[in-house]
Image (cartoon, rainbow, N blue to C red):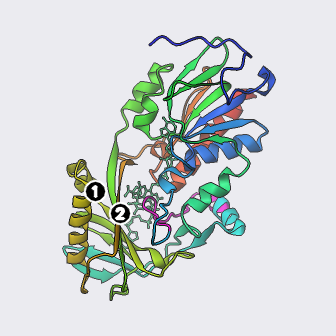
């Protein structure tokens, strides 16, 4: 498809900015990485415009509203090891959107459950995981339900084309903050970057929540699982601020199981993971009163990288996301900071 070359500063869409002096920076993706970059750029005095194909912020840290309350179907908790992220988490805690979570932890190996306490500090969004992204997004202009399909550069500025055919721009720079396979599709303007990003494989995760009217008779609140279709279990009500009127559990399948059952129906996934859960927990397991399944196609990078962020600074194109670092919440935040740092450095 041949794309129009944008002439500036002619307005081209509803999100068009004004004169070239105030041309803003486009950020595609409002997960942790995109919001981290947006906050850093906004703090440095730059105008940003965020886009997300979803109906709200958070990406893999979003929470699903349901009849049994909000459920964290993606990220379950996070740890903070880098001192910059530790400081950020303390700020979120002061703002009231983050609290520590100290579950009664178990380990399941070859079908045997055993307590597995440790000293690790674990954090969760409160009252739900998405609270962090919501707090970060305050004051940042964002367009939702807007899937960006193409990113292209005119003589001077960038334009975005969404899946509905609407053009957005002009933008001085573009930050892609989406999972690697989705970033590759938007990197036609930068073939070298596209090749590097295309090499990053991401694995899926099937996530299921089951609610029980009567609490299960187990002290377990979180469990690392081995030798099973499952690799993680969490009891939602044990996290601060959650609705605990029914006993809701989140079960995550392993990457291997998720890949093998990628096209299974939601009903069949719920049935199979409920079965694996019942085998694992040493207590009577009734039928759930509520269940839901979500397939995360790009849940985690298949291999870790140490890139921080990727960029073609001369073009004005930056790429970040958890997959540029650890594949965790902390890595996503650090990657967004690094993309912003490199962009600001290039402007000087
Ligand atoms: C099941 C599961 C469990 C996890 N558990 C943990 C955990 O316990 N601890 C931990 O630290 N991490 C965990 N993670 C990982 C953590 O959630 C991620 O590392 C982090 O949230 C990634 O943030 P991100 O901004 O890089 O990407 P994302 O959160 O994926 O954000 C990308 C955003 O881009 C949007 N987008 C994509 N393509 C387009 C497009 N073309 N146009 C517009 N918008 C687009 C998406 O809608 C999304 O909102 C888990 C992830 C999953 C899936
Ligand atoms: N399902 C997904 O798609 C997905 C994606 C990204 C991250 N994650 C998970 O997010 C977590 C984040 O990692 P982190 O380093 O921030 O947290 P962490 O330190 O709690 O866990 C890291 C890993 O150490 C092991 N571990 C930690 N504490 C344990 C204990 N008390 N008993 C037994 N094993 C224990 C587990 O294997 C765990 O996966 C990991 O568990 C990771 O698997 C899941």
> Image point 61% across, 29% down: which residue?
174
Sequence-wise, the earlier of marks 2 and 1 is: 1
Identify the disc placed on residue 160.
none
Q: Are marks 2 and 1 in contact (CB under 8 Å)?
A: yes
Q: Secondary structure at mark 2?
A: strand
Q: Secondary structure at mark 1?
A: helix
Identify the disc placed on residue 266.
1
> Image point 26% across, 73% down: which residue?
277
Q: Which residues are magenta?
A: 70-87
Residue 337 visible, this orientation: no
Image spot of residue 37 (x, y percent): 63, 43
Relative to 247, 120 lies left or right: right
Image vertical order of residue 213 relative to residue 10, above or below: below
Relative to 135, 129 lies left or right: left
Dominant SS in magenta: loop
Judge by depth and name the residue closer to the eye, 326 or 22.
22
Image spot of residue 110 (x, y percent): 19, 73
Q: Quadrant of residue 151?
A: top right
Is 288 within the magenta? no
């Amino acid at each position: 498809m041949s794309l129009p070359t944008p002439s500036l500063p002619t307005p081209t869409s509803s999100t068009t900015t004004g004169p070239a002096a105030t041309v803003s920076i486009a950020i595609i993706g409002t997960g942790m990485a995109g919001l981290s970059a947006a906050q850093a750029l906004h703090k440095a005095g730059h105008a940003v415009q965020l886009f997300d194909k979803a109906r709200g912020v958070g990406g893999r840290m979003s929470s699903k509203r349901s009849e049994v309350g909000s459920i964290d179907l993606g990220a379950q908790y996070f740890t903070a090891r880098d001192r910059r992220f530790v400081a950020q988490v303390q700020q979120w805690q002061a703002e009231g959107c983050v609290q520590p979570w100290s579950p009664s932890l178990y380990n399941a190996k070859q079908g045997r459950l055993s307590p597995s306490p440790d000293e690790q500090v674990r954090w969760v969004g409160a009252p739900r995981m998405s609270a962090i992204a919501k707090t970060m997004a305050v004051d940042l202009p964002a367009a939702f339900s807007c899937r960006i399909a193409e990113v292209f550069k005119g003589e001077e500025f960038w334009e975005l084309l969404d899946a509905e055919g609407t053009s957005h721009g002009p933008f001085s720079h573009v930050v892609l903050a989406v999972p690697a396979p989705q970033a590759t599709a938007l990197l036609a303007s930068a073939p070298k970057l596209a090749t590097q990003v295309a090499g990053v494989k991401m694995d899926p995760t099937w996530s299921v929540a089951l609610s029980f009217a009567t609490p299960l008779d187990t002290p377990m609140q979180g469990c690392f699982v081995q030798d099973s279709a499952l690799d993680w279990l969490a009891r939602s009500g044990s996290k601060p601020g959650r609705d605990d009127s029914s006993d809701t559990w989140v079960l995550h399948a392993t990457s291997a199981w998720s890949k093998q059952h990628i096209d299974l129906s939601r009903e069949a996934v719920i049935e199979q993971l409920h079965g694996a859960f019942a085998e694992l927990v040493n207590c009577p397991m009734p039928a759930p009163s509520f269940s839901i399944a979500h397939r995360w196609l790009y849940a985690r990078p298949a291999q870790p990288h140490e890139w921080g962020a990727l960029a073609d600074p001369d073009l004005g194109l930056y790429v970040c996301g958890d997959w540029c670092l650890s594949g965790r919440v902390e890595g996503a935040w650090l990657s967004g900071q690094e993309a912003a740092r490199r962009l600001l450095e290039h402007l000087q």
